[in-house]
Image (tube, rainbow, N blue to C red):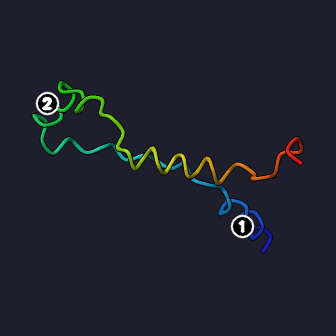
Amino acid sequence: MANKALATRQKKQVAPTRVPPSPPPRNPVAVAAKARAGGAGPHAKPPSTERQAAKRQLANIALKPDPDES
């Protein structure tokens, strides 16, 4: 009965977790080609993106009357 508290403390210790190694690439040729290509390059933003950004900015602005115009 005297060792019961010791066993409980030992159970509460957190065991170190190991990170499993990453698996090899499924297609090493495709990985090399993707790294060499560097993506599709820069693109222009579509007009809808600019409209949505403008709508978000308007929503954030508190629409209050100017005190100078009264």
Q: Is residue 28 left or right of residue 2?
A: left
Is residue 19 depicted above or below 35 in this figure? below
Q: Residues within 10 Å of mark 1 (few under 14, many from 20)?
A: few
Q: Which percent across, then down, holds residue 29? A: 10, 34
Q: Which percent across, then down, holds residue 52? A: 49, 51
Query: Are circles 2 and 1 on residues that touch, CB within 8 Å?
Result: no
Identified at 75% across, 71% down, the residue is 4
Q: Residues within 10 Å of mark 2 (few under 14, many from 20)?
A: few
Q: Nearer the viewer, residue 69 or 20?
A: 69
Tell me which numbered mark, 2 or 1, is placed earlier along the sequence.
1
Is residue 58 depicted above or below 25 in this figure? below
Q: Nearer the viewer, residue 66 or 24?
A: 66
Identified at 63% across, 50% down, the residue is 58
Identified at 36% across, 39% down, the residue is 45
Q: Is residue 43 left or right of residue 65?
A: left
Q: Is residue 69 left or right of residue 57?
A: right
Residue bearing the label numbered 2:
33
Observer-side mark, 2 or 1, equals: 2
Residue bearing the label numbered 1:
8
Q: Which percent across, then down, holds residue 43? A: 30, 33
* Disc 2 from disc 1: Cα separation: 55 Å
Residue 5 in which image quadrant: bottom right
Residue 44 in which image quadrant: top left
Residue 28 in which image quadrant: top left
Is residue 9 depicted above or below 47 in this figure? below
Which residue type carries mark 2?
Ala
Residue located farthest toward the front when viewing the structure as drawn: 70
Task: Assign a secondary structure to mark 2.
Answer: helix
Which residue type carries mark 1?
Thr
